[in-house]
Amino acid sequence: MQILIVGTGYVGLVTGACFAEMGHTVTCLDINEEKIEMLKKGLCPIFEPGLDELVKRNLQQKRLSFTTDYKKSVREAKICFIAVPTPSRADGSCDISYVENAARQIAQHMDDYRIIVNKSTVPVGTAARVSAIIREEKGSSFAFDVVSNPEFLKEGAAIQDCLKPDRIIIGASSTKAIEILREIYSPFTLSHDRILIMDILSAEMTKYAANAMLALRISFMNEMAAVCKEVGANINEVRKGIGSDTRIGYSFLYPGAGYGGSCFPKDVRALIATAKNVGCQPLLLEAVDAVNEKQKTVLGKNMLQYFASRGGVKNKTIGVWGLSFKPDTDDMREAPSITFIRSLLKEGANLRLFDPISMSNAKKMLGDSSQITWCENEFEAANTADAVALLTEWKQFRLVDFHEIRKNMKGIAFFDGRNQYKPFEMKEKGFDYIAIGVPDQLQS
Ligand code: NAD
């Protein structure tokens, strides 16, 4: 089936490549010409494990193509997926103007029945808004269907999530559209049926409820970590103790430097706005967001406190391991590392930064500063540092030679923002070890 994906970012490109891999003919469209030119040459503009090969293979086999041309691609495709950004407005509500623009441009070139599928994360009522736009453009007798099909992929594991989704949610009111969506997704459901059909409003709401639930678990653990630290308990032990309860489970119970990325922060805020808009009091959601904002400052505050009795953080050198909001992605959107780095720059510290993949995106966000040195690896970042801070738990940081690291550092402090290391071992290796929700392990 000929499929059009409008918006060729993390979601659109991965979805397009996976549909093509399953045998569909897919065109990915974007308004960013530079991105499309790169992709036409088989070059991936984003880092996502496995995506490069998938794009190259399907491009070569002519199942995947790239364009900026709405007219030709809408005429050729029977179904148009919208995967454009839905950022936060200043008040936290969701800005659906990119979706509205995409819908209007699709509508202007529709010459026959089409299905328009919202894959972007959009507030309840957006499918109705998309329908209204199409009716404005085409008149009330034109035949089309709008479907909600929210995306649940995780950056860093996006290909696997897309090829083997836990569930495929289809919110639709038209039997014809449901049948076509079932056909498109049939190669993804061979082992068992993963498709959940529901009404459009519930499908739109499901995506927000899922992200809010996951964010809630993280904020809950971060709050527990704060209490653990004060009472002398160890959140790592508490996590195992509660995760072993099958009613709770182990997923998303990791405390850390706060959640970031392009989804959780904006989706929690958008759901707060939706709730308020309909007269509900989103007490829990507001707490999830507030705890996270506070959490992003914890590591920086721990550092200030540590150096307060050691001459202050001004002019100290801090090595930073990991910048992206999580491992296996180059995505820097709302990354906790940015809050941490900016707070230390403000205090006059010098920073030695390293991330395996996201350095160029980080440079765009942080800009030029005489206080920043961009490093080639974790050893270089730790070299001459008074302290090292782990912000993103990339696998390559798991089994580092800490004796070598310690030897080349000026100071002995290690701030673990992801609780990756064993506190007593770090102390034995000569570090002052400060983590999240774990008693500090100081040399004296
Ligand atoms: P992104 O910023 O990586 O990509 C969006 C792309 O859309 C950009 O390349 C942009 O140039 C393009 N675009 C904007 N307006 C356009 C238009 N009118 N026509 C054609 N292209 C246009 O965004 P993303 O991370 O892929 O997110 C897209 C949507 O999917 C958002 O609603 C997001 O919340 C949701 N989502 C994201 C993830 C994730 O992990 N990134 C997961 C699930 C859902």
Image (cartoon, grey):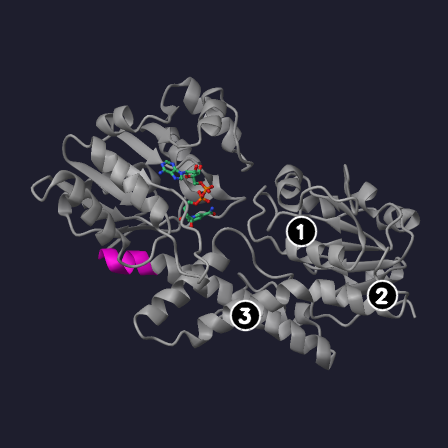
Q: Is residue 125 above or below residue 62?
A: below
* The furthest residue to the left: 141
Image disc number at residue 290: 3
Can you tell which of label 3 and label 1 is closer to the viewer?
3
Mark 2, residues whose alpha carbon is within 10 Å: few (<14), some, or many (≥20)?
Answer: some
Q: Is residue 201 magenta?
A: yes
Q: Secondary structure at mark 1?
A: loop
Observer able to see residue 122: yes
Observer able to see residue 23: no
Image disc number at residue 438: none
Query: What type is the residue that disc 2 sits on?
Result: Phe
- Residue placed at 36% from the left, 33% from the top? 19
Q: Position of residue 214 (x, y in %)?
A: 48, 62
* Mark nearer the N terminus (1 vs 2): 2
Q: Which residues are magenta?
A: 199-205
Foreground pick, 381 / 235 = 381
State the CA–CA distance, disc 3 to disc 1: 23 Å
Query: What type is the residue that disc 1 sits on?
Result: Glu
Image disc number at residue 307: 2
The quarter of the picture where residue 282 lies is bottom left
Q: Secondary structure at mark 2?
A: helix
Q: Position of residue 345 (x, y in %)?
A: 75, 54
Query: Dot 1 corresponds to which residue?
Result: 393
